[in-house]
């Protein structure tokens, strides 16, 4: 009998499959199991709607046989089966929406992606097969047919003598090459792993004969090897079970196995919805970030299932960046297996699910903060960065959503505090939420500006991360209270600004000149107690922001407007006044003091040589 040719679009797809360089060839098994599942579903449905169809539900199953010696893998189902016409129509052409999408995309890369994300059904078996035979007998028919193909050169359909209804896919695997191994697909442990990974929740049992060993009964005897049929899949997804049926251990084991973690999650979020969108979701907050979480390689996302079949391993659109550390999965029957990735992004159902989940995660974190402060603080230490970045991302689109989840070290309680706690403790006349920036808590504690503020009983939040100040700049206000850096030149403390006396103003002018444009002002300070000098900034950009911004390309010119503040109560001020007439000496003192002020603020010295020379000549 002459070979029939595949329809042209099918041929293209086949060519791609046969020559696929796609690394996840393993997904072919998922596709074939998913087809088998559908075929059994169809028969089962028929039995529910047609009384003459008499089947025993308990017999329905999928069987996998792997023969290492011959390199043959067989997947059998006792589902609805295919007639001769079905074989011709279904396996001779591709008329699926997924394939249609595929056809439209001519870029090779995109084609590969489609294989990865959604599979292309039956044809994906040609990624691993030299030759495929499909024997099938439609339910209720007396005839069985065999479809056979080695790929691009077409296919044949012949009679065969299959006894039972259903379909049997026989795959002769390709020979191993230097780069590619195919014999792994007849390895029982590999198959077991693949079923667990992709098809664990298929409703019907997936059975396979597995080699077992029993320890020898008597000493000196060899262990006994035997074959036993095993069901590889657990059949009921844990996320479809009732919460009351599940123990912490069930959740923890599932999490660790599925998401390759050694430690139990700190929070399990098991939720579902029925209505306009229906889904089951199971999410976990890990105790620690995964090793790659803070690298560019990390990909956030939840696994996406539809009807128990995994269609995407990391669906990014299901998680916002601020919660990118969450692991988990969503199962929704409303999604089609065949939709392309672009369509998925615009899928309304998916968007609705993502928005539900985002709120849900926040609620859970808030309740953890309320009920188990210790756990929350340790979570926060690990995942504060995405939350703070979330405040300022997208021009603060999520700032109100996230502002109650962030915490900063507080000078008053000497541990982490929320913004709400700060505001509740604010003094009656206090206008601002004060913060101080620095490298570490220790360094901030030693800032000259902080001493007096503390004495007056103001609480100060310590910002030790680059993102902190930017985040509150975007936040602008919390509970109607503005944020203010204690390094701001007008701090508006309760004692009001110390007015520079007229007689001192001339001195300050001379000092400003000596600094030759480095500062916009020299003035008497209201925020110093025992320290002689400090720098502050006027305007929007603080010295801390300057430090961060200047490390980014294109921002080299960004400068804070610096103000040199002098403690007029300090003996050094008397000294300055006394040498006012000596222009040279005053200039040296001023430059040295300015450099000292910058150093206490953690800014590196522009010209250490000049500084040293000035200092030495003053000591001399
Ligand atoms: P899809 O399953 O997405 O429709 P496939 O290329 O995998 O695409 O399969 C094409 C068609 O072949 C299926 O729609 C189904 O009608 C038929 N088919 C595939 N495998 C089986 C099977 N094991 N039993 C019955 N029919 C099958």
Image (cartoon, rainbow, N blue to C red):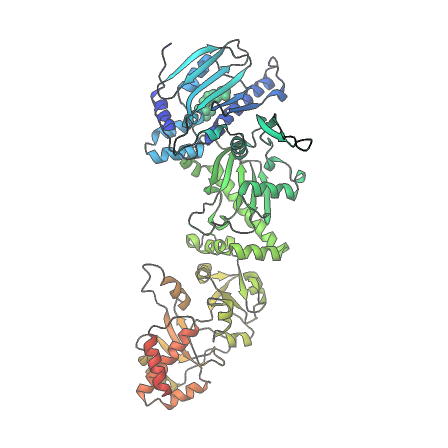
**Among the 4 quarters of the image, the one containing residue 411:** bottom right
**Among the 4 quarters of the image, the one containing residue 112:** top left
Residue shown at 57%/56% (left/top)?
Answer: 378
Does residue 219 appear left or right of residue 49 in this picture?
A: right
Residue shown at 47%/37% (left/top)?
Answer: 348
Q: Nearer the viewer, residue 313 or 71?
A: 71
Farthest residue, direction right? 218
Residue shown at 51%/26% (left/top)?
Answer: 33
Q: Locate the C terminus by quadrant.
A: bottom left
Instruction: Provide residue 323's location: percent of width, then percent of height.
Output: 50, 49
Q: Nearer the viewer, residue 281 or 619?
A: 619
Farthest residue, direction front? 220
Q: Is residue 524 visible?
A: yes
Q: Is residue 337 visible?
A: no
Does residue 313 appear left or right of residue 257 in this picture?
A: left
Residue 478, relative to residue 31: is it above or below? below
Instruction: Provide residue 106's location: percent of width, then percent of height.
Output: 32, 32
Please count the marks in the image.
0
Does residue 247 appear left or right of residue 20 in this picture?
A: right
Instruction: Provide residue 255's location: percent of width, then percent of height.
Output: 57, 42
Q: Nearer the viewer, residue 157 or 39?
A: 157
Residue 490, relative to residue 168: is it above or below? below
Residue 373, relative to residue 533: is it above or below? above
Q: Locate the N terminus by quadrant.
A: top left
Instruction: Provide residue 216's location: percent of width, then percent of height.
Output: 66, 31
Residue 420, relative to residue 127: is it above or below? below
């Amino acid at each position: 009998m002459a070979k029939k040719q595949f329809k042209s679009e099918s041929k293209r797809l086949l060519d791609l499959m046969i020559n696929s360089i796609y690394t996840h060839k393993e997904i072919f098994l998922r596709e074939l199991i998913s087809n088998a599942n559908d075929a059994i579903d169809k028969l089962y449905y028929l039995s529910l709607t047609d009384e003459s169809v008499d089947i025993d539900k308990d017999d329905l199953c999928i069987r996998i046989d792997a023969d290492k010696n011959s390199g043959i893998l067989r997947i059998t189902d006792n589902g609805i089966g295919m007639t001769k016409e079905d074989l011709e129509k279904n396996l001779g052409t591709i008329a699926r929406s997924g394939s249609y999408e595929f056809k439209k995309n001519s870029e090779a890369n995109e084609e590969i992606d489609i294989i990865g994300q959604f599979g292309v059904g039956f044809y994906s078996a040609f990624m691993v097969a030299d030759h495929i035979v499909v024997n099938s007998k439609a339910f209720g028919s007396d005839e069985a047919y065999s479809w056979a193909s080695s790929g691009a050169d077409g296919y044949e359909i012949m009679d065969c003598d299959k006894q039972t209804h259903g379909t049997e896919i026989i795959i002769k695997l390709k020979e191993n090459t230097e780069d590619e191994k195919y014999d792994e697909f007849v390895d029982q442990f590999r198959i077991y792993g693949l079923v667990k990974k992709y098809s664990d929740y298929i409703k019907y049992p997936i059975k396979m004969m597995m080699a077992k060993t029993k320890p020898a009964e008597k000493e000196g005897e060899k262990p006994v090897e035997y074959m036993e049929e095993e069901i590889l899949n657990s059949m009921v997804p844990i996320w479809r079970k009732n919460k009351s049926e599940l123990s912490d251990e069930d959740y923890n084991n599932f999490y660790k196995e599925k998401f390759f973690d050694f430690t139990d999650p700190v929070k399990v979020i098991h939720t579902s919805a029925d209505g306009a969108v229906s889904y089951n979701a199971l999410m976990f907050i890990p105790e620690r970030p995964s090793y790659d979480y803070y690298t560019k390689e990390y990909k956030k996302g939840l696994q996406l299932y539809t009807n128990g079949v995994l269609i995407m391993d990391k669906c990014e659109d299901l998680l916002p960046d601020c919660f990118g550390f969450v692991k988990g999965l969503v199962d929704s029957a409303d999604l089609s297996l065949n939709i392309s990735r672009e369509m998925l992004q615009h899928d309304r159902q998916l968007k609705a699910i993502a928005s539900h989940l985002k709120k849900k995660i926040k609620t859970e974190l808030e309740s953890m903060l309320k009920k188990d402060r210790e756990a929350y603080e340790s979570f926060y230490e690990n995942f504060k960065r995405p939350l703070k970045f979330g405040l300022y991302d997208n021009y603060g689109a999520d700032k109100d959503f996230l502002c109650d989840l962030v915490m900063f070290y507080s000078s008053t309680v000497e541990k982490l505090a929320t913004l709400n706690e700060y505001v509740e403790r604010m003094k009656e006349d206090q206008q601002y939420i004060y913060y101080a920036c620095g490298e570490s808590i220790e360094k901030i504690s030693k800032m000259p500006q902080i001493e007096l503020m503390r004495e007056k009983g103001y609480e100060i939040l310590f910002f030790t991360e680059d993102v902190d100040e930017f985040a509150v700049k975007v936040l602008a206000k919390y509970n109607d209270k503005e944020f203010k850096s204690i390094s701001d030149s007008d701090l508006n403390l309760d004692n009001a600004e110390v007015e520079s006396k007229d007689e001192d103003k001339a001195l300050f002018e001379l000092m400003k000149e000596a600094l030759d444009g480095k500062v916009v002002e020299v003035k008497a300070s209201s925020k110093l107690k025992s320290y002689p000098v400090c720098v502050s900034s006027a305007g929007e950009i603080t010295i801390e922001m300057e430090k961060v911004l200047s490390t980014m390309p294109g921002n080299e010119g960004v400068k804070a407007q610096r103000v040199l503040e002098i403690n007029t109560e300090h003996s050094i001020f008397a000294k300055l006044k006394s040498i006012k007439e000596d222009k040279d000496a005053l200039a040296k003192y001023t430059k040295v003091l300015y450099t000292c002020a910058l150093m206490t603020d953690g800014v590196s010295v522009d010209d250490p040589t000049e500084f040293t020379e000035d200092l030495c000549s003053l000591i001399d």
